[in-house]
Image (cartoon, grey):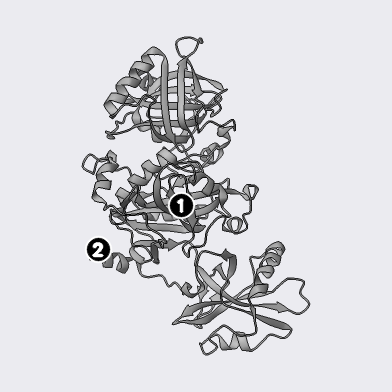
Amino acid sequence: MDLQAYIEKRDFSKTTEPAAGISNNKNSLVFVVQKHAASHLHYDFRLEMDGVLKSWAIPKGPSTDPKAKHLAMMVEDHPFDYRNFEGNIPQGEYGGGTVIVWDQGIYEPIEAIEGKTAQEARLLQELSSGSLKIKLYGQKLRGEFALKTHDMGENGWLLIKHNDQFANAADITLQDRSVISGKNLEDMAISANNVWNQDHTEPVKLQENPNSTPLDISTFLAEAPESAMPKDIKPMKPTLVDAPFDDPDWLFENKWDGYRAIATINNFNAKLLSRNDVSFTKYYPIIDILHTWPCNAVIDGEIVVMREDGKTDFGALQNWKSEKDGLLVYCVFDILWYEGHDLTNLPLQQRQVILQQVLAKNGNDKIRQSKATPASGKALFENAEKHGYEGIVAKKANSVYTPDQRSKEWLKIKVQRRQEVVIGGFTKNKDTSKQFSALLLGVYESGKLRFVGKVGTGFSVALQMEMMESFTTYISGVNPFDTEAPGSISPLNKKTTGEAITWLMPELICEVNFAEVTKDGLFRQASFKGMRIDKKAMDVELEIPKNTTQTIDQVTK
């Protein structure tokens, strides 16, 4: 079952599968589970051992039910780089079909053994004896498992879950998406185009560069000062710029269309707060998972509703009430404090490595690391345009975390113009059956609310009724807008025949798309995207994109 058998079965002029690869991680062993739609659907369970990935094909897939004993047929060793393989193997080639990375993480023997070398030696002994006992720290599979030989020839084994705190009779294979790309097999079959890793970005892996800092987070933690767990952290904010760019000193990731959220985990006790300290208790599935984490940490991310096609749905997030309303996912991209250490002054790359290991030990399919790719911002932006994402975020690889600051070391580039606005009132046309005809929008300038236009599209009937219920608390007889401001006098004071205006106290916030800002300062072709509950009205100001090149030059200097 050595690597030569793997090589002999493949024609590398026809398949893009990796042929080699070694691990530079001196501290941990990795595992991966790949879902493979070949002639028969199965799951490939792979364990790093002896420089390769020892591999078993599991027709029914892994199970977290201790009563289930699933057949696992041992197959040829695979090269270490295969752990990241996703895409299409050409039909007619060995294993022809589609592959996704269903789960990944690190693992160790159940027997407490210090050091990767000693752990590996023990595991090789157990492999030879036909009984492997391992503990997985994956994003889906966690806890203790056993692999034991079975009476179906020398290659027949059984994969069995031990009855521990992670045991569950639910069918875990219903979680059918890749932990790398977020795609299921159907998505990957359409988009992969027979190219390995084309449609996903890898997390930063410092350990694969022999000249970089080794992947030993204890080294990083030693450089971080000790401190008590911080309270009331306000998230770091990116600066809006006008164009994507490529730069080897920057990392790029998707801009998620959701609610920014800071999570504090205090040894099985978690809180999830918005950027203005609103508790996100309504998103209980995420909090329930964080409650299971046996660690102490403060992490930063975005709560989203993830559709089956991998896109986020902000409207569904706003209206989410229960799990039938969509899949909640917490896309985590930073860690600010961990086990008594303030990490905010560590370089971003080091923080991401720490985050990667924390998620590997505690992660779940609903809590995922937002993958960062170095250098290639233009390609990621094109992908965001193609697939309908909101945009991308660029982060200086060595940037520190500055809470409650809008930094030029973090930049955002939007596919469409989009803006948070304060709702100052609504109009209702004569004889309309709608709850309202349009919302009156404003942004703050020098402490005054400036009128920026109306939005009358993007509402369903049900949404309008729900919004009107919330409006009743804020109805006011006072115009909240600065009527002295240019461009606001005419639209607000010269009413259209048959149109009634109801003023609201300027406390509610929504988000709109728009085509452009006119010379009078009004939004043209505005479209409603959703209400926002994670920001204070006085903080809503017009975002004007800065010049990308000039902004990067300022950071470099």
Mark 2 / mark 1, whichever is N-terminal? 1
Q: Is residue 29 above or below residue 427?
A: above
Q: Is residue 497 above or below residue 75?
A: below
Count how many numbered circles sit on residues in the image: 2
Q: Position of residue 190 (x, y in %)?
A: 53, 40
Q: Amino acid at mark 1?
A: Asn
Along the viewing direction, whichever of 187 and 477 lies nearer the viewer: 477
Question: Which element is circle 2 on?
Answer: helix
> Which quadrant of the rendered structure holds the N terminus?
top left
Closer mark to the observer between disc 2 and disc 1: 2
Q: Amino acid at mark 2?
A: Thr
Q: Position of residue 526 (x, y in %)?
A: 58, 71
Whether residue 243 is visible, yes or no, is no
Judge left or right: residue 347 versus residue 535. left
Q: Position of residue 47 (x, y in %)?
A: 39, 26
Judge left or right: residue 531 versus residue 49. right
> Which quadrant of the rendered structure holds the C terminus?
bottom left
Whether residue 510 is visible, yes or no, is yes
Residue under label 1, please give it.
Answer: 383
Question: Which element is circle 1 on?
Answer: helix
Judge left or right: residue 515 versus residue 18. right
Q: Quadrant of residue 544?
A: bottom left
Q: Position of residue 252 (x, y in %)?
A: 37, 53
Judge left or right: residue 49 versus residue 279. left
Residue at x 55% of width, y 37% of height: 176
Q: Is residue 152 above or below residue 240?
A: above
Residue at x 35% of width, y 59% of height: 245
Residue under label 2, please give it.
Answer: 556
Q: Is residue 290 above or below residue 52?
A: below
Q: CA distance from mark 2 to mark 1?
A: 27 Å
Residue at x 62% of width, y 54% of height: 320
Q: Quadrant of residue 85?
A: top left
